[in-house]
Amino acid sequence: MEWVKTRNQFHTIRRSLRARRLGAKYSLIERAFSAQAFLAQADDDTLLDASLELAEAVRLEERSDPHGGRPETRLLLDEGTYPDVECPPAVAHVLAGLDGSSTLRESITRAGLPRRAEHLLSDYALETLSDLLELVFVERGD
C-alpha cells in the first residue's frame, strides 16, 4: 500500500477511485454540482450570454394530437432518473440550438421573430433553461 504525503494528492487519488467505481454516473454528478454552482451566481444576462450545450443524452420529442389539439414538445434526458421537461415548440427549438459555441441570446435572435415575440420567447426560454440546468440537461460549453 502506498501512502500519500499531502492532503491534495490523497484527495485526488480518492476522487479518481470514486470516479472509476461510479462510471457514467460520476459525470452526471459532476454536471449537477457544476450546474448548481453556475445557477447560484447567474442572472438572466449571464444565462443569455453563456456558451451552453445540451447534454449528449438529451432528446427532443414532438407529438401531434390527431384530434387537433396543440402539439406537445418535450426534452428528455436518457440517463440518471430519465427526467423530461415539457415546453412550447419554439422554446424547445431555441434550446436545441445550444451547441456549446453559441449562446441562448444568439439562438433566440436566429429565430427571426418580431421584438415583442422575441422578448416573450426569451422569458420562456430562460425559465425552461433554469429547469434544464437543475435537471442536468445542459452543460457549459467551451
Image (cartoon, grey):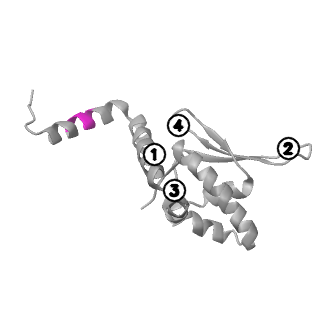
Marks 1 and 2 sit apart, C-alpha to C-alpha, by 36 Å
Q: Earlier in the sequence, mark 3 or mark 2?
A: 3
Determine whether the residue tagged by mark 2 lies in a helix, strand or loop. loop
Provide residue 64's location: percent of width, then percent of height.
Answer: 82, 46
Spatial CA span between label 2 and label 4: 27 Å
- Left or right, 5 with respect to 58, comes to left
User: On the image, numbered disc 4 is attached to which residue?
Assistant: 79
User: Tag 4's secondary structure?
Assistant: loop
Q: Which residues are magenta?
A: 13-17
User: Where is 74 relative to 47, above or below?
Assistant: above
**Amino acid carrying mark 1 in the image:** Gln
Residue drawn where x is 42% and y is 35% of the image: 25
Q: Are marks 3 and 4 in contact (CB under 8 Å)?
A: no
Q: CA distance from mark 3 to mark 1?
A: 16 Å
Chief secondary structure of the magenta span?
helix
**46 or 64, which is in the foreground?**
46
In depth, the one of 23 and 123 nearer the eye is: 123
Q: How many residues crowd mark 1 within 10 Å: few (<14), some (14–19), many (20+)?
A: some
Other residues around mark 2 within 10 Å, as few (<14) / some (14–19) / many (≥20): few
Which mark sits nearer the N-terminus, 1 or 2? 1
